[in-house]
Amino acid sequence: MLENVSKALKGALLTCVAVGVAGSGFAQSLEEVKTQRGLTDKDILAAAKTYTPSGMKDEYYVFSSGGQAGQVIVYGVPSMRILKYIGVFTPEPWQGWGFDKHSKDILAQGKIRGKEITWGDTHHPGLSETKGDYDGQYLFINDKANPRVAVIDLKTFETTQIVVNPIFKSEHGSTIVTPNTEYVIEVAQYAAPFEDKYVPLEDYNDKYRGGVTYWKFDRKKGKIDIKRSFTVELPPYMQDVTDAGKGPSYGWSFTNTVNSERYQGGFGNGNVPEFSKRLPNEAGMSAKDTDYMTIVNWKAAEKLFQQGKYKKINDHAVISMDDMVKANALFLVPEPKSPHGNDVSPDGTHIIVAGKLDTHASVYSWTKMKNMIDSKDFASTDPYGLPILDLKRSLARQVNLGLGPLHTQYGKGDSVYTSLYVESSIVHWNYKTGKVLEKMPINYNVGHLVTAEGDTVDPDGKYLISLNKLAIDRFLGVGPLHPQNHQLIDIKKGQPMQLLYDMPLPLGEPHYAQMIKADKLKPIVRYKKKSFKHRVRPGREKVVRNGNNVTIYSTAIRSHYSPEVIKVKVGDKITWHMSNVERAQDQTHGFTVDGLNIHGSLEPGETSTFEFVVDKEGVYPFYCTEFCSALHLEMTGYLLVEP
Ligand code: CUK
Ligand code: CUA
């Protein structure tokens, strides 16, 4: 330890040299800084482990959900420097996301029953996988509030598709990818009728449904193939966090399922008769001692789909519970009260479930469950005919961890880390021996955890981030709404966990994140010009009128637009194609026209299109919104609208 500290001190000293003004030597000695700022040796060590000098790059990318911001947050580890907010379900002006035709069209894919939705509640980002390993090609993200999933291309870090779930009215256990990204899994949350119609709560048991959708991913096209996707119908319980099987459990998916009581807010049809109708949901929905894990054989479901054994609801294939049960492909196993986290081990042999209202984590053995499934050895069935496996005989062990265990992440070997929401701690334990190794307090109230490459078949260990819901006293006050707090923790093997860094996140509420080795990503620095249908070449700029339709073909390059003066008439329908013809890395030009809610961010090689009607005569300056050169202010022009 001491040796490490002295090494770190040396590192930090070298850093001091690097940042010192040339020729002036040290501004201050390390000892002086320590004294002045009240830092300990441990603090200096933590600083040296995260400090990333200018030009040095991070080892990992983190893709974090942006929660209610409807976006994805990208940052680096170990520096915890924010790199990007990717506009997904919500317009993002800097990127022009939602302000040019292309991005408007993608956002329009996300309309729900004809209504435009300009926000999302993103929860679980899912990186594409090949053989159970993150491959760095695509990222998927869900919207819990408006049941949708989005595809992000990691070459451009841009959203390329939004798909609306045609039958769910809310969702949550998404987006989970199968080990070769065959499917992107989306799971319903609050049971509702699949059809878009009113069904009274009295018909809850018979007509309300849960479900799990398997969105077929076409890797070549980089798109979800809606026609080859299907949903498995589930009982009207509340399906929750989900994980995909791998190794021996490949072909299966596992979903936590709460409200097996089917309680409906005290107005229901007596599913929980011992409760008076005045009890709130939280009591009625957690009345029973156990809920379920729902086990689906998606390979078998895929076969039923290919055989045409489904019915279409809202033009979407739905496989019935009956057909799934007949195919020996749908099961339940009890879980301790109100389960939440549900995480398959890297080798696919175990599933760790943590119930918020139980102090234990339950380690399920896939071998045991699979044997019972194969020999049709069931304890009972639920009211919908789903076979239920015996709880005790499904468990490898239960381990007492502490108060409010939520989510588990896998480290190196048999090491796992579980968040304890109520205790505000992280517990490190061994899921194969059941031994609790270490507990560490965090600030405060952790939800998910993320470890380096944690959802792959071969996690790296090394780093753990605690995705905390509250920050309370950790940062400067910014009014009653505090930032979220992501705490970086060193989990190198054989050492006690060490807190390295608190990062306030002013975009929330992030739920889950994934951490991927940086060298797996190959982002581009400029667009292939040819990929844009309306590309404008230098020298070919023009304005074409066809009746009321005016098409403007223009270019942007340091530091001018061509053309610079454009005359149109009131009421003209304008289609404005703009190509950034730069080759140089990072030479972005912006584009806006005064007062028309238009904004573009044109990266090198990119062509964007803006469509609008000017319905008032006048003089409309347009200009470049990105400080692109010494003559950036002069990168401007006039759109003259004649009466
Ligand atoms: S959920 Cu938010 S802390 Cu959406 Cu995975 Cu558990
Ligand atoms: Cu182009 Cu400023």
Image (cartoon, rainbow, N blue to C red):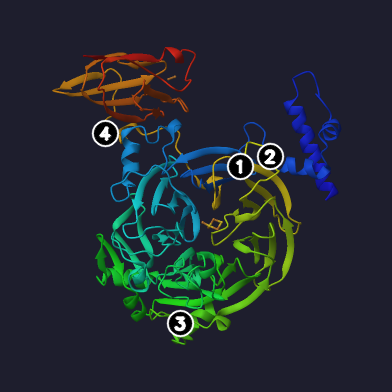
- Quick one: SS at disc 2? loop
- Kindly identify which residue carries mark 3: 373
State which tag comes first along the sequence, 1 or 3: 3
Badge count? 4
| Displayed quadrant of residue 492 | bottom right
The answer as to whether callout 1 falls within 8 Å of ligand 1 is no
Asked if the residue at tag 4 contacts the one at tag 2, i.e. Cβ–Cβ closer than 8 Å, the answer is no
Q: How far separated are the C-alphas under marks 1 and 2?
A: 8 Å
State which tag comes first along the sequence, 1 or 4: 1
Amino acid type shown at disc 2: Phe
State which tag comes first along the sequence, 3 or 2: 3
**x, y percent for residue 579:** 33, 26
Q: Which one is in front in this view, the residue at disc 3 or the one at disc 2?
A: 2
Q: How far separated are the C-alphas under marks 1 and 4?
A: 42 Å
Q: Is residue 15 left or right of residue 366?
A: right
Give the residue displayed 58% in from the left and 39% down from the top.
506
Give the residue displayed 39% in from the left and 42% down from the top.
118
- Kindly identify which residue carries mark 4: 533
Asked if the residue at tag 2 contacts the one at tag 3, i.e. Cβ–Cβ closer than 8 Å, the answer is no
Figure quadrant of the C terminus: top left
Any part of residue 438 in sight: yes
Dot 1, crowdedness within 10 Å: few (<14), some or many (≥20)? many
Q: Is residue 294 left or right of residue 464?
A: left
Name the outermost residue toward the left: 547
Amino acid type shown at disc 3: Ile
**x, y percent for residue 255:** 47, 67
Dot 2, crowdedness within 10 Å: few (<14), some or many (≥20)? some
Residue 483 is labelled as 1
Amino acid type shown at disc 4: Lys
Q: How far separated are the C-alphas under marks 3 and 2?
A: 52 Å
Asked if the residue at tag 2 contacts the one at tag 1, i.e. Cβ–Cβ closer than 8 Å, the answer is yes
